[in-house]
């Protein structure tokens, strides 16, 4: 899904070949991808009229004029502008009418897919009689509407199960999973595969054969799955799917449940009934706050992955990356960089390097197996990886990312050793979650090239990169790091140096408040449950165990010094729990107990209650727990914004969602505050301050907003 251009130039062209095949080429002007918009719908309707009325045309091929995409989906700007369910329903009904014309045409349509065929793009392809795709790394097919809080509104909930079977369709519909070309062919979604260079000619040949009756769409095997769809047993499959959705989402996301309702309507009442349900529920989702917040998040992430022309000019090309430290973080950074440049990983221990090499090799093998990486690309990337204990081998690196243990003196020493061997124009980045970058760079030979690149673990799965700049960091160093981070596939926010930067800073009071609640008698599991019911993927106590209680105590102590004047004093119990040998998942014993292999979680470690007031616990209202933790986090985000650590509320929302798991459907801390209203927030925080202390004093900006009735966002 993507934003369309406002250009008035046509978005498609129609070419009639001498063999009677009409080639319809999509090419949204002013955009790197093709998008479905109101304007394009009108153009497609005219093209369908021309194809139907011209006796010389016997078949049609739909193809893209873009080099790496078929159709990426709907124009989300237009969807976001809709304020009523009726508007959304009209859009869905219009899409149905258009695609039904393609599906019912007496002249066969062939979808010639190269690159991304996502959302409405795949729905267009599914309406065609024949789907041809290129066996290429760029080709992906999927229905990711659920990721932006919507459902496929162009018949996708009906045509996909009919094509690939119910159990194969549900993961695509409910998770937004994308299939590579070979996976799509194996699933029965694609009729045939071809090469990018031969796509149009192969599609036209297939179109002619379909027209003269010498080719039929690929015959799909009759399977147990197809039998399930045609008998009442499908209700069992849908019931299990609904149970799984509720377990994962706790009912907080309406889109997956609406998708299941559409699928069931089609299976029980027929295709038209399923379409009617799509029209109804698509409209409701469009008008809901969840979809609007998820669309805004998608758009914000897209914006943060763009690089301005002046910044591109400043960025130094990185031909060689050096990663210092072969732990999980260093290994992850190297893994997402191998397709961009040569990578040298330096560590002091051969065992660490061997482990990193093994894990990177496995990761590349998995990607080859999935079809996302060719064997040739795998071999090229592996050949570009160097693992060494020799500091001299990092010479020649344009960018160095240090990922050693969180210790200030160690990081200073590594910086000094690195500056002794790298070129004067090389950029040095330190990966740290809380140590001040200015303190690390204090004795640097050239502090202008030093900045922070705070990745989140595991790097290949966590999409946020927090770049931290000091008052001395040069624009060239920032541009280089940001361009490389974007190329790695990260969503990049840039923040100023300060205690905890942004993400660690707002997480600290959130976690500390959880500890204070435990000291007041809250139950461990009840506290976690309250925040998961609010929408966090894991509860705060579980997160403490995941981070490591020793790390949390260290960060809490350091940040507590910075914010003690505001009443944010760190928990006194956490250091005692650590001293007793409870470090969290890493040693199998924290607030919970863990299996020896580190994977399975066992019951609550009741022994820690002796540090938290004893085994007798008391009940807290879930609403109080949620208010105390979320308002601490959001209030701290306002401080970060007002102090200039953040450049915008949007960066703050994206950082909290992608880095800390703030519920995406709530939009992030600033959207959350806007949804509550500043007046309500200030009133509630004053109540909490009276009950629990000055740490709940609302930021003065919130007080001013409450009086003026203003918001962080205008829309």
Image (cartoon, rainbow, N blue to C red):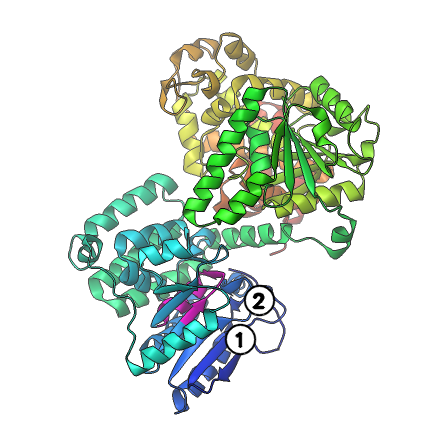
Residue 638 visible: yes
Given contact means CB atoms under 8 Å apart, are the residues at marks 1 and 2 in contact? yes
Where in the figure is residue 399, as x and y percent of width and height?
Answer: 71, 37
Circle 2 is placed at which residue position? 4
Residue 45, quarter of picture: bottom left
Residue 112, quarter of picture: bottom left
SS assignment at label 2: loop
The stretch drawn in magenta includes residue 127 = yes
Q: Which mark is residue 206?
A: none
Q: Residue at x 52, y 44 (%)?
A: 378
Where in the figure is residue 405, as x and y percent of width and height?
Answer: 63, 21
Query: Toward the viewer: 530 or 416?
Result: 416
In the image, the segment drawn in magenta is: 111-128
Q: Residue at x 74, y 22 (%)?
A: 412
Where in the figure is residue 225, as x and y percent of width and height?
Answer: 22, 54
Q: Residues within 10 Å of mark 1 (few under 14, many from 20)?
A: few
- Marks 1 and 2, the one that precedes in the sequence: 2
Quarter of the figure with the C terminus = bottom right
Circle 1 is placed at which residue position? 39
Residue 105 visible: no
SS assignment at label 1: helix
């Amino acid at each position: 899904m993507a934003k369309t251009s406002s250009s008035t130039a046509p978005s498609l062209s129609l070419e009639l070949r001498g063999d009677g095949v009409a080639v319809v080429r999509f090419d949204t002007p002013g955009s790197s991808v093709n998008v479905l918009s109101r304007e394009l719908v009108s153009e497609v309707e005219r093209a369908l009229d021309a194809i139907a009325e011209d006796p010389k045309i016997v078949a049609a091929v739909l193809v893209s004029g873009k080099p790496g995409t078929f159709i990426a989906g709907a124009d989300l700007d237009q969807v976001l502008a809709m304020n009523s369910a009726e508007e959304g329903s009209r859009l869905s009904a219009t899409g149905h009418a258009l695609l039904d014309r393609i599906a019912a045409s007496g002249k066969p349509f062939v979808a010639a897919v190269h690159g991304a065929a996502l959302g409405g793009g795949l729905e267009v392809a599914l309406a065609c009689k024949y789907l041809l795709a290129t066996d290429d790394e760029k080709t992906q097919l999927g229905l990711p509407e659920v990721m932006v809080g919507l459902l496929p509104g162009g018949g996708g909930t009906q045509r996909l199960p009919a094509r690939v079977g119910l159990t194969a369709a549900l993961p695509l519909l409910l998770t937004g999973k994308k299939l590579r070309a070979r996976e799509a062919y194996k699933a029965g979604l694609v009729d045939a595969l071809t090469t990018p260079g031969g796509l149009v000619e192969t599609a036209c040949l297939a179109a002619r054969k379909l027209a003269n009756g010498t080719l039929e769409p690929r015959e799909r095997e009759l399977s147990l799955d197809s039998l399930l769809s045609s008998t009442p047993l499908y209700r069992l499959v849908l019931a299990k799917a609904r149970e799984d959705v509720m377990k994962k989402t706790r009912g907080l996301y309406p889109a997956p449940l609406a998708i299941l309702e559409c699928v069931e309507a089609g299976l029980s009442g027929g295709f038209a009934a399923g379409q009617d349900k799509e029209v109804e529920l698509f409209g409701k989702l469009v008008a809901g706050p969840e979809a609007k917040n998820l669309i805004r998040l998608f758009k914000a992430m897209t914006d943060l992955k763009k690089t301005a022309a002046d910044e591109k000019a400043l960025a130094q090309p990185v031909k060689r990356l050096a990663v210092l430290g072969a732990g999980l973080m260093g290994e992850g950074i190297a893994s997402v960089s191998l397709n961009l440049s040569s990578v040298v990983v330096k560590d002091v221990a051969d065992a660490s390097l061997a482990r990193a090499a093994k894990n990177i090799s496995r990761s590349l093998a998995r990607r080859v197996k999935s079809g996302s990486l060719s064997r040739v690309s795998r071999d090229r990337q592996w050949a570009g990886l160097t693992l060494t204990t020799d500091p001299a081998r990092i010479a020649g690196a344009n960018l160095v990312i240090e990922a050693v243990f969180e210790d200030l003196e160690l990081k200073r020493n590594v910086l000094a050793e690195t500056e002794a061997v790298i070129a004067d124009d090389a950029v040095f980045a330190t990966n740290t979650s809380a140590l001040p970058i200015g303190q690390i760079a204090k004795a640097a030979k050239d502090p202008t090239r030093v900045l922070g690149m705070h990745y989140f673990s595991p790097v290949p799965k966590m999409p946020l990169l927090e770049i931290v700049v000091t008052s001395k960091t040069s624009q060239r160093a920032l541009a280089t790091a940001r361009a490389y981070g974007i190329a790695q596939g990260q969503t990049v926010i840039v923040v100023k140096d300060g205690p905890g930067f942004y993400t660690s800073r707002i997480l600290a009071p959130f976690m500390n408040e959880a500890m204070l609640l435990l000291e007041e008698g809250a139950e461990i599991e009840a506290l976690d449950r309250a925040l998961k019911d609010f929408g966090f993927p894991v509860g705060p106590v579980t997160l403490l165990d995941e981070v490591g209680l020793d790390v949390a105590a260290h960060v809490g102590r350091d940040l507590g010094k910075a914010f003690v004047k505001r009443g944010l004093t760190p928990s006194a119990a956490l250091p005692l729990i650590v001293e007793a040998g409870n470090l969290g998942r890493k040693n199998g014993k924290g607030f919970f107990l863990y299996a020896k292999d580190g994977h399975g979680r066992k019951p609550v470690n009741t022994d820690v209650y002796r540090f938290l007031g004893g085994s007798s616990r008391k009940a807290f209202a879930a609403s109080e727990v949620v208010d105390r933790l979320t308002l601490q986090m959001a209030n701290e985000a306002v401080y970060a914004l007002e102090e200039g650590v953040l450049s915008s509320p949007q960066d703050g929302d994206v950082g909290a969602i992608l880095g800390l798991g703030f519920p995406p459907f709530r939009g992030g801390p600033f959207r959350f505050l806007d949804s509550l209203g500043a007046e309500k927030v200030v009133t509630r925080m004053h109540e909490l301050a009276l009950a629990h202390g000055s740490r709940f004093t609302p930021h003065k900006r919130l007080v001013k907003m409450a009086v003026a009735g203003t918001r962080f966002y205008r829309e």
